[in-house]
Amino acid sequence: MAKEAIKHALIPKHTKLSDKEKEKVLEEYQITVNELPSILLSDAALRGLDAQEGDVIKIERESPTAGTATFYRGVING
């Protein structure tokens, strides 16, 4: 089951994907976790997600003109 990060007006919704969801995304885009743009394990937006290196984070940004934009980031320990 996916977990959500901290809530703040300026931080878009961050969700840690389950292993099943992660595999589905990686298969859909035919990539590996290392080929995703990265997000640091120490990033404040990941607090409360229990994220580990190698996890995939789904980021959803709301826009009045573009609707919802979805991005994926691979967690690294940098």
Image (cartoon, rainbow, N blue to C red):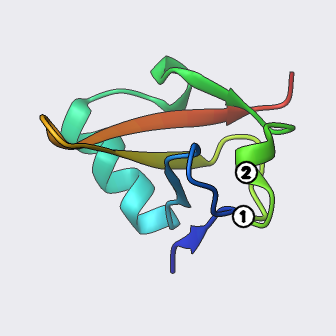
- Relative horizontal placement of residue 23, taking residue 24 as reference (left or right): right
The residue tagged with tag 2: helix, strand or loop?
Answer: helix
Quadrant assignment, res 48: bottom right
Residue shown at 56% from the left, 53% from the top: 9
Please say if 75 is above or below 47.
above
Between residues 78 and 31, which one lies in front from this camera angle? 78
Please rate how many residues cluster around mark 2, counting C-alpha atoms within 10 Å: few if below 14, some from 14 to 19, many from 20. Answer: many
Q: Position of residue 58 (x, y in %)?
A: 45, 49
Task: Please give the name of the residue rendered at 51% of the width and 67% of the height, measured from the top-left corner.
Answer: 18
User: Which residue is rendered at x = 80% and y = 57% of the image?
Assistant: 47
Would residue 30 be found to the left or right of residue 58 on screen? left
Q: Are marks 1 and 2 in contact (CB under 8 Å)?
A: yes
- The disc at residue 49 is 1
Mark 1, secondary structure of its residue = loop
- What amino acid type is highlighted by mark number 2? Leu
Please state if 24 lies on the left or on the right of 49 as rendered. left
Residue type at numbered disc 1: Leu
| Direction from residue 64 to residue 25 in the image, left or right | right
Using the numbered discs, state the Cα–Cα distance from disc 1 to disc 2 in whole angstroms. Answer: 6 Å
